[in-house]
Image (spheres, grey):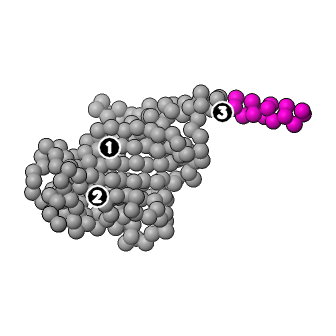
């Protein structure tokens, strides 16, 4: 009887704790080490645009540290067109939202895209925060909408984000809706690339991970 009562009491305490955490915006799971960032970028070539599906994962401490750096930078360079960032909210969900909004244009600016040797700027289409085992931020960028034709082109993508942070970094290129990819220096999907930590890669392999090339054009009949 005593054992059952103790178990029931412990269960109630645990459920109360979980409910309180969820009400406060707590994300269950484990945090990644400070400064550790996992990043994937799936490049998708469509007939009418090139899309970049970018996902990053990091711990809350890393997020807050990065936001502080971004805010200090924004305070130094503030102007009417580019006001300084606000203080990061204390509430968890709001803090991740503020960080995501601050990061989107910076991520896009640090992804260099070249089509046949000519640069193209990225535009943010959407973003969201996903709370699972770790917190991940997903972004969708695009470029060259309605500026492409049926001709084959050479695509170069250089991701210059988080190069000082440990964690895996994967970039892949694939074609959709009748387009194929040939002569590529990377895989078709990020899931085909191993998750080797950035610190474990040689300088040459690091460059190969973040600077990728491929030829994009209509799929050829077998």
**Residue at the location (46% across, 62% down)?**
195
**Residue nearest the observer in this picture, 175 or 81:** 175
Residue at numbered disc 3: 18
Residue at numbered disc 1: 140
The residues tagged by marks 2 and 3 sit, at their Cα atoms, a distance apart of 41 Å
Q: Judging from the image, what secondary structure is the residue with disc 1 in? A: strand
**Residue at the location (34% across, 61% down)?**
210
Residue 90 shows up from this direction: no
The residues tagged by marks 1 and 3 sit, at their Cα atoms, a distance apart of 32 Å
Residue at numbered disc 2: 173
- Residue 194 bears which disc, if any? none
The C terminus lies in quadrant: bottom left
Q: How many marks?
A: 3
Specify the segment rendered in magenta.
Answer: 1-17
Q: Residue 27 appears at what percent x and percent y? A: 57, 38
Mark 1 closeness class: few <14, some 14–19, many ≥20 residues within 10 Å: many
Instruction: Determine the image quadrant of residue 80.
Output: top left
């Amino acid at each position: 009887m005593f054992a059952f009562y103790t178990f029931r009491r412990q269960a109630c305490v645990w459920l109360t704790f979980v409910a309180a955490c969820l009400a406060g915006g707590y994300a269950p799971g484990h945090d990644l080490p400070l400064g550790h960032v996992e990043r994937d970028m799936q490049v998708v070539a469509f007939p009418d645009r090139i899309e970049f599906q970018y996902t990053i994962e990091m711990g809350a401490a890393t997020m807050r540290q990065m936001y502080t750096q971004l805010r200090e930078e924004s305070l130094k360079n503030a102007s009417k067109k580019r006001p300084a960032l606000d203080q990061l909210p204390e509430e968890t969900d709001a803090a991740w939202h503020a960080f995501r909004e601050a990061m989107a244009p910076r991520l896009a600016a640090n992804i260099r895209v070249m089509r046949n040797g000519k640069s193209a700027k990225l535009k943010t289409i959407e973003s969201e925060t996903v709370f699972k085992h770790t917190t991940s931020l997903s972004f969708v960028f695009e470029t060259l909408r309605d500026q492409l034709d049926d001709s084959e082109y050479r695509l170069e993508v250089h991701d210059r984000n988080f190069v000082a942070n440990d964690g895996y970094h994967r970039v892949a290129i694939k074609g959709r809706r009748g387009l194929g990819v040939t002569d590529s220096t990377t895989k078709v999907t990020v899931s085909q690339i191993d998750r080797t930590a950035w610190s474990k890669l040689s300088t040459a392999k690091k460059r190969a991970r973040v600077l990728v090339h491929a030829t994009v054009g209509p799929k050829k009949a077998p």
